[in-house]
Amino acid sequence: MNKKNWLKFGIAGVCALVFVTGCSSKSTDNGNSHSHTDIMIEDITGETENVNQSVSQEENDSQSGEDIEQVLADYRSDRAKGESDTPDGYVLAVAPNEEDYGFGVGDTSYTSRFDTKEVSEAFKAAEKYIEDTLKIKPPLYCCVDPRMTAIYDDEDKGVANSYDADNIFLCEYSENGEWQYIILVREGKGKEWTVLFHGNTYKQ
């Protein structure tokens, strides 16, 4: 194995050790019924409110996505600064403290589901996939994107719907500055890891 590719094991070791306004209504004697005109006004007001709420939610989601991307960029930059060559030619990577970042970025607690051997085997399978299938050789890291690690708690696991959390493993890598994710799965503890999917979301 190329010694520079030992980076993934350094990372694996660290990983193992993100106003409704009411309209005035015209009432009958009992004060409970609305005129036809007032009902129409209320319906229109409610529809306008729903549209405004929808637009506001989309804006918030967009802003949140931009914020997460910035925090991810900061984390990955700091992670790269923690990489160093060892005297024997290997690369040691020390992951930053995820508590220094927002949105849950950097949290790799999902790896605690697996022992060191299982993590190492998952990285080996991911490395073989990107070298043999994708024909690239970027460093591999534990996934630190909370939008991806959400798969472990999400009832809808998307492309990995037929697998439970204990049989899913995530890696990430950068190709030409674009971060991609690898989803590995296995049929059960002790079984071989295989790559199920690579891309930027687990949702189908």
Image (cartoon, rainbow, N blue to C red):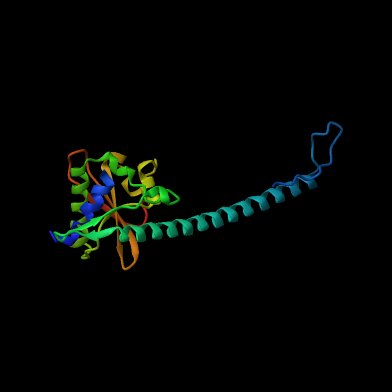
Q: Which residue is the extreme one toward the bottom?
A: 176
- Location of residue 93 with respect to 38 vertically, above or below: below
- The image position of residue 120, as x and y in percent, is 19, 48
Whether residue 21 is visible to the viewer of this picture, yes or no, is: yes
Whether residue 203 is visible to the viewer of this picture, yes or no, is: no
- Give the total of numbered labels: 0
Q: Which residue is the extreme one toward the top?
A: 30
Q: Quadrant of residue 25?
A: top right
- The image position of residue 193, as x and y in percent, is 20, 47
Question: Residue at position x 40%, y 59% from top?
Answer: 74
Q: Check the picture and name the quadrant holding the N terminus.
A: bottom left
- The image position of residue 181, as x and y in percent, is 31, 56
Answer left or right for 45 relative to 93.
right
- The image position of residue 145, as x and y in percent, is 38, 52
Q: Which of 67 and 33 is in front in this view?
A: 67
Q: Nearer the viewer, residue 58 or 96?
A: 96
Q: Which of 173 and 104 is in front in this view?
A: 104
Question: Residue at position x 25%, y 57% from top?
Answer: 140
Q: Which residue is the extreme one toward the right?
A: 29
Q: Quadrant of residue 173?
A: bottom left
Question: Residue at position x 24%, y 60% from top?
Answer: 84
